[in-house]
Image (cartoon, helix red, strand yellow):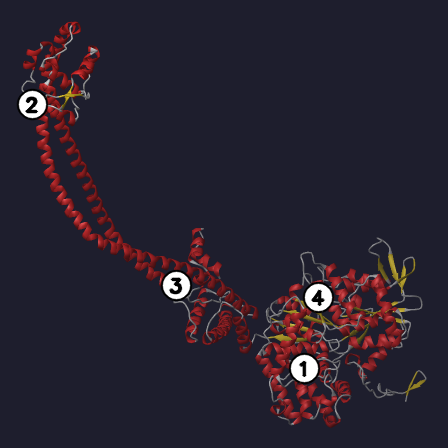
Amino acid sequence: MLSLFGVLGQWRNWLHGVPDFNIPPDTKFSDIIVPTMDTIRTSHVLEMLLKNKKTVLCVGPTGTGKTLTIADKLTSKMPKEFLPEFIVFSAKTSANQTQDLIDGKLDKRRKGVFGPPLGKYFIFFIDDLNMPALEQYGAQPPIELIRQWMDFYGWYDRKAIGDFRNLVDVNFCCAMGPPGGGRNPITARLQRHFNLLAFTEMEDPSKKKIFGTILKSWMPPSCAQYTDKMVETCILVYNTIITQLLPTPAKSHYTFNLRDLSKVFQGMLMMEQGKIEGINDVMKLWYHESCRVFQDRLVNDEDRSWFDNLMKSKMKSEFNIEFDDVVKQQPLIFGDFMSQGGDQKPYVEITDHEKMVKLLDEYLEDYNQINTAQMKLVLFMDAVKHVSRISRIIRQPLGNALLLGMGGSGRQSLTRLAAHINEYDCFQIELAKNYGMTEWRDDLKNTMMKAGLENKPMVFLFSDTQIKAESFLEDLNNILNSGDVPNIYAFDDLENIYTAMKPACQDMGMQPTKTNLFSLYTKNVRSNLHTVITMSPLGEIFRARLRQFPALVNCCTIDWFSEWPADALRSVALRFLMDIPELETTDQIMEGLVVMCQEIQVSVFNHSQKFLAELSRYNYVTPTSYLELLGIFSKLVGMKKTELNTARNRLKTGLDKLLTTADEVAKLSAELETMKPLLAEAVKESVATMEQISKDTLVAKDTMEVVEREEAQATVKAKENTAIADDAQRDLNEALPALRSGPLTRPPVGVKMVVEAVCIMKEVKPKKIAGDKPGERINDYWDPGKALLSDPGKFLESLFKFDKDNIPDDVIKKIQPLIDNPDFTPAAIAKGRGSQEGEAGPAQADLAETQAILEAAKMRLHDVQEGIATLQAKYDDCVRKKDELGPEVYRLIGGLADEKDRWKESVEKLESIINNYLGDVLGKYRSDMQEEWVRKLDENKVPRTGEPTLVATCLTRSKFAAGRSQGSPRIICRQRTV
């Protein structure tokens, strides 16, 4: 009993009068709040302060129950006139956002005065108060706005310049963690306005009470005696982890809080009580859920082995159970996706891994049939484990995931598959050139309304490559914390929300106030919207984001995607290589190629580690690199296959032409051999012809000399005959008058002979008359001759123009008897009639005969010369062809034979191919790796070219030469190839 100022009282325990807490059977895990002495005490003090309109600031580490205690007090254990509103600060929260959010909740009372509806009192709960980043001068604008209200009970209107907004009937209750890790100390000017409540680390008795109460409600009777021991062991494991696995720059996500311990029990409660047959089943389930919460975020095998040893030691020391007796199969996988159809899917251990992989392949095939965007996944065991983990996370209420790993590890694809397995809609934004905050907010709002109004499970998949503005992460931070994004809903959207939530609110026995309606809507959003964020853990930007947006760690289950194990590399390589249609090879070579792909990835990773140790430079080897290796190999195989076929066809065409040419050359050679005797015969004929030509030349020469002498004699005779003709002309001129006066009727014999000779020479046909003998007919030229003499002028002119040099042979033959007649002489004829002496020119006949002989000799000489020239030309042509064709034929045959061998060698070289896989490493490392890969190729009996090089594989000689011709140095061409 205690007396104070005359008033009597007594001390009572905070738990005095508190009824035993029992969890209703259908209560969601997220709605379970087990009262402890700490929560009851803090809740009571908090209620007293808020009812008396005092501002409150709750300070404590993450996971100590600040948010849960305050939210529970404000939503269910305060008088009805108090209306709570929740705000979550982040590093990117601005003063304008905060002001707009608060102003948007208030109604106008009168000019310049704003507040909640009449009769109500707003309490704004601001979580993570000290998260906003410092501005240029060290201030935090959002909390300076809150300080302004505490000093002046309002702030200035940004739209109406100079107008001050007085805020009445409002209060602020805030929570924050201690400064550090992205949190900043608040200013003393703000802190002085608050009543501080400290939330210390929860003591182990409180933890035991909370989790013991939860576990007892689930533990089957056969294992009830192990409940307290199980809770104590979980707490021991948790305490060991938070003291041993500390965050470092490379492990910045190694931050654990009571939320993680709570997730272990939440996972255990996913399994139906009736599925537990004994303590070994409980141990197995506890080990699995502990691995999912703690081990899945560990970054290396060393830490994972440490955790396994910790679990094994606790099993042995606390329960005297050997780990191998509990976990008889690795990997240990639990899931509810093995039961197809039906609303109830039991969460059980999956022992038939082959059946599980087959079933997941069926899910994948079903996904590809439904969706336009196809997923070509290789479900090796590591991928299967990640699918089961993601599926487990999104099946839990408030289940959100942070998937950490390198690009290409399958985080997004496996998330889509897990969402499809659970029949959830999976939404992911589609970035475009003009995608900004407006489009982002619209996408986010539509997704939230589908989850909240339609009560439809959704997976919101977001990648760090889609972060166009850090405000994207701020909105996600708000969704993870509270399920709401400030100022995202328009007035019409809010009206739709209130209308849709009213029936559900009435069914739950709640007043359909706007606060309750929106609170129910937000609860649906948090329960149905599962946010899965994929990030790369490399670099400072990742660590900065974890500091600026703590909900990424605190409100998400982390799954670390390690580098692919050997079986994963093998499975992916085999799948890719089998899908290359151009890769026609044997099983042995295919096995060698698969092993080579694994060797190359491991080799590059090892050399990158060496590279980092020696030069302090990073070269990240990611699953994307492996996929690029396979993709480049596939592309090169197709490209080289095409090049090989083109080159082979071109060379085969050339070889066919060579063979055809060789056949033709062989034919030419045979013809040449056949022509050799003919050529020899032609040579002999040429020699004989030359001898004949020599003889004919001598004969022709003699003939020419005779002809020349005869021509000289004929010339002399011609001159003499000309003189005689002139004399005859003169005599004729003298005789013409007498001739005209007295024609001859009976000419003398000599005259008759002259007339006959003239007619023969002029080829005048004779007249047939009777001869001396009976019946004889003889030629008479007198009458035709008289016809010639009828016109003496014309006759004489014809004699002057007579072509004495070209007398026909038959004329000479006809006139020959007259020439041989001894009476046919000028003297004899002169006796008959002197005036006709000039008509008997025997010299003319001699001249004609001589001329004929000469012309015959000339013709014979001409024929001989032409024959000689023809034979000489033929001989020269044969000799020339022989001289030219012989060496050319043998040179062509020899050259084609050499070319044929070289082309055959080129075809053989083109039959093999090798792909090189090189990253951002120096030349020495590159050459070392190349030598190692060549050695591995030989060990695995993979066909290769003689001296494989990167440039030779990726560039043809023509392309390399083209680069060199453009002035690029040789090393630049190689770097471009890399």
- Most extreme residue toward the right is 6
Where is residue 591 drawn, in percent x and y? 48, 76
Q: Residues within 10 Å of mark 3 (few under 14, many from 20)?
A: some
The quarter of the picture where the N terminus appears is bottom right
Check whether the beta carbons of the residues at disc 2 and disc 4 lie within 8 A of each other: no
Dot 4 and dot 1 residues touching (CB under 8 Å): no
The answer to whether 150 is drawn above or below residue 308 in the figure is above
| Mark 4 vs 1, N-terminal side | 1
Which class describes the residues within 10 Å of circle 2: few (<14), some (14-19), or many (20+)? few
Query: Looking at the image, do the residues carrying marks 2 and 3 touch, with CB atoms under 8 Å apart?
Result: no
Q: Which residue is mark 3?
A: 907
Does the rendering let one see residue 386?
no
Do the numbered discs 4 and 3 sit on residues whose CB atoms are within 8 Å? Answer: no
Q: CA distance from mark 3 to mark 1?
A: 55 Å
- The CA distance from mark 4 to mark 1 is 35 Å
> In terms of secondary structure, where does tag 1 sit?
loop
> Circle 2 is placed at which residue position?
820
Q: CA distance from mark 2 to mark 4?
A: 146 Å
